[in-house]
Structure formats: structure tokens, C-alpha cells
Amino acid sequence: MNMFFNQYMDDMIKPMREELTNAGFKELMTPEEVAETFEQTKGTALVVVNSVCGCAAGLARPSAIASLKHDKKPDHLFTVFAGQEKEATAKAREYFEGYPPSSPSFALMKDGKIVGMVERHDIEDNDPENIVGKLTTLYDEYCG
């Protein structure tokens, strides 16, 4: 039964993963990969905490992708998947100092440090233009 459920979940979330990876986001799958990536990345990075959680997740992924059409954008794109790679997500959240766990969410980092966050409550019940606007405001402030 558990093997069947795991395959079902993998099949269900595959398009959710691919939506971001096809747009250039690199999946971080382990805590070690998160730590190494965040510690070694110079410049700005958008980290999407991906999720299957309802309409907020359905708004988050397309909004993150649409935000990349802005003149200023992050140098690097990463994603962790809450509820799937739990340890990697927990490790990423250690870097989001001052923000409670939230999924889906977006963290903008600069030289491995958090500089801005768009949390679930900023995403759910919002329209994509406003979500993109929250991200591009951060890009304008922190991205070259």
C-alpha cells in the first residue's frame, strides 16, 4: 500500500516540479545540497518553497515564472518541495531567519542571506499580478 501511495504522489507532483524546473529552477533535494548551494551562491537567488497546498500553490508557481520576465531578476533560481523533500525544506528554512515556515513561499536571498520573503498569506486569495508585483519589488531593490 505504501509503495502504491508513494508512486501516486510522485505521479501527482511531477507536473508541479516540472513547472519550475522547465523554467530554469534547480531542485535542491537534500539538506547537504541546500547548505552547499546557499553557502556558495554569490549574488541574488530566488528560492521557491514549492507545495501541493491548494490554490496558493497553483498561484505561486506561475507567478514565480512570470516574475522572471521583469527587467531585474535574480541571478539564481532554486526550489525545495515542502512535504516531499522534508529535510531539504527544513534546512532551507533555517536560512529564512525571522520568517515562520510557510508553503508555498518565495525567499529572495543575496550572498546566502535572506533579504525578502513572500509568504503563503501574501499568495493565497491574491491575484497573480499582485504576487508578481511583490516579487518584482524585491528584485528592483536587490537584483542588479
Image (spheres, rainbow, N blue to C red):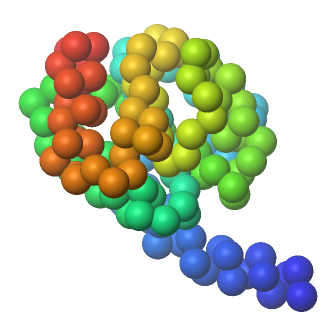
Q: In the displayed structure, would residue 110 be above or below residue 58? A: above
Q: Quadrant of the C terminus?
A: top left
**Position of residue 54 measured from the top left corner of the image (x, y, whole percent):** 49, 65
- In this orientation, does residue 20 appear? no
Residue at position x 26%, y 43% in the image: 131
Residue 5: name its quadrant.
bottom right
Residue at position x 69%, y 57% in the image: 84
Q: In the displayed structure, would residue 98 be above or below residue 9? A: above
- In this orientation, does residue 69 appear? yes
Q: Is residue 49 left or right of residue 128?
A: right
Which of 47 and 38 lies nearest the eye of the viewer? Answer: 47
**Outermost left residue:** 71
Residue at position x 37%, y 46% in the image: 123
Residue at position x 27%, y 14% in the image: 142
Which of 33 and 104 lies nearest the eye of the viewer? Answer: 104
Residue 31: name its quadrant.
top right
Which of 42 and 65 lies nearest the eye of the viewer? Answer: 65
Which of 37 and 50 lies nearest the eye of the viewer? Answer: 50
**Position of residue 121 measured from the top left corner of the image (x, y, whole percent):** 43, 41
Q: Quadrant of the N terminus?
A: bottom right
Q: Is residue 38 left or right of residue 56?
A: right
**Position of residue 13 measured from the top left corner of the image (x, y, whole percent):** 56, 71
Residue 90: name its quadrant.
top right
Number of marks drawn: 0
Q: In the displayed structure, would residue 95 be above or below residue 54? A: above
**Position of residue 78 measured from the top left corner of the image (x, y, whole percent):** 48, 39
